[in-house]
Image (tube, rainbow, N blue to C red):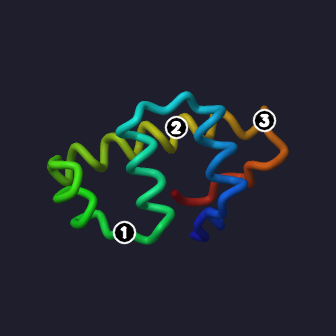
Amino acid sequence: MDKIPWNRVILDEYVSLALLTEEEENIIRTRAAGWSQVKQCHTFSMSPSALARKIKKMKTKYDSLIPYSDKLPVNIDF
């Protein structure tokens, strides 16, 4: 499956609409910047399973926001 073509417009739109926590915002911004999940786990002091749960939660938020924004592409993969 294809991934979302993250750019500043899409990222800022998602962050503003999703009401992300500071931790979630840091995760999505570093993920869009190309950080590996291992690097994110070390930087944010969390286990891989905790990171996966947070990413899944953010994906659910993203999917629920698609109808409310013309800037967010249809989510194909986070």
- Marks 2 and 3, the one that precedes in the sequence: 2
Three-letter amino acid code at the position of disc 1: Trp
- State the residue position of label 2: 60
Q: Provide the secondary structure element on which disc 3 rests.
A: helix
Q: Nearer the viewer, mark 1 or mark 2?
A: 1
Q: Position of residue 64 (x, y in %)?
A: 64, 33
- Alpha carbons under labels 1 and 3: distance apart: 28 Å
Q: Residue at x 65, y 47 (%)?
A: 12
From the image, state whether disc 1 or disc 3 is nearer to you: 1
Q: Which residue is mark 1?
A: 35
Q: What residue is at 55 percent from the left and 28 percent from the top?
A: 19
Q: Quadrant of residue 39?
A: bottom left
Task: Point out residue 49 in the picture as x, y percentages from the top left corner.
Answer: 20, 48
* Left or right: 54, with 10 as reference point: left
How far across and how far down the image is residue 16, in percent?
63, 35
Q: Earlier in the sequence, mark 1 or mark 3?
A: 1
The residue where tag 3 is placed is 67
**CA–CA distance in space, label 1 to label 2:** 21 Å
